[in-house]
């Protein structure tokens, strides 16, 4: 178990990973992969920006920012390499760092999927599982990685400045 990770966080992240896999499988099984599905997908995503529940376009990135704020500051304090680059390029640290990031973002992914499911049932009278998953990725996962990287850079420079002042 990663440092600072509780059993609940670990179970939640496994649940969210299984849910994401199930949504992907069910979505492809129900609707298949075709040009019509692709066109509907992008049209539905574009319509979400102007429809009801647009507050989630601010809420989900804000929740991702809060998770990234904590993790980015912790990375800077502990002297870890940049999360984003470590997760992609350092093969030794990759599994632990990606798991740590997924544990941190699991709640936000679950929030995103839930909010999009509510939107779909309310507005579309259908449920498109892959669209719910994609909206969670677009509004939570991608912002989390970006915010964590930015927070880590800012915190690292802040701690370096503070260290020079105390000497």
Image (tube, rainbow, N blue to C red):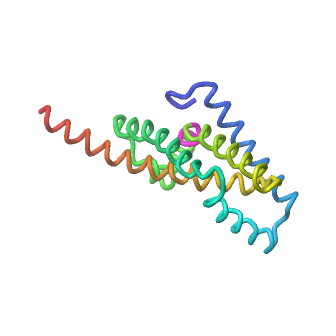
Q: Is residue 94 left or right of residue 82?
A: right
Furthest residue toward right = 30
Residue at 54% of width from left, 54% of height from top?
142
Give coordinates of residue 97: x percent, y percent. Answer: 52, 42
Q: For the magenta stretch, what is the residue range?
A: 99-103
Main secondary-structure element of the magenta-colored stretch: helix
**Is residue 48 shown above or below 43?**
above
Residue at 23% of width from left, 41% of height from top?
160
Q: Quadrant of the N terminus?
A: top right
Q: Does the magenta stretch include residue 105?
A: no
Q: Would you say residue 92 is visible in this rendering?
A: no
Give coordinates of residue 130: x percent, y percent. Answer: 75, 56
Residue 59, by quadrant, is top right
Residue at 66% of width from left, 33% of height from top?
12
Q: Quadrant of the C terminus?
A: top left
Residue at 59% of width from left, 48% of height from top?
56
Q: Which of the pair 108/8 is nearer the observer?
A: 108
Q: In this view, does 31 lie to the left or right of 63?
A: right
Furthest residue toward bottom = 35
Q: Which of the pair 27/124 is nearer the observer?
A: 124
Q: Would you say residue 133 is visible in this rendering?
A: yes
Give coordinates of residue 69: x percent, y percent. Answer: 42, 40
């Amino acid at each position: 178990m990663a440092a600072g990770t509780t059993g609940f966080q670990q179970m939640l992240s496994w649940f969210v990973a299984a849910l994401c896999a199930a949504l992907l499988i069910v979505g492809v099984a129900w609707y298949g992969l075709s040009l019509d599905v692709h066109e509907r997908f992008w049209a539905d995503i574009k319509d979400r920006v102007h429809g009801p529940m647009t507050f989630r376009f601010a809420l989900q990135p804000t929740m991702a920012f809060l998770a990234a704020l904590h993790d980015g500051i912790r990375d800077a304090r502990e002297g870890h390499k940049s999360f984003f680059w470590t997760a992609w390029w350092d093969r030794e640290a990759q599994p632990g760092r990606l798991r740590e990031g997924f544990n941190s973002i699991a709640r936000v992914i679950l929030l995103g999927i839930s909010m999009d499911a509510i939107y779909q049932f309310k507005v579309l009278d259908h449920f498109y599982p892959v669209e719910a998953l994609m909206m969670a990725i677009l509004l939570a996962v991608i912002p989390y990685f970006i915010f964590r990287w930015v927070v880590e850079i800012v915190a690292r420079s802040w701690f370096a400045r503070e260290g020079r002042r105390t000497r």
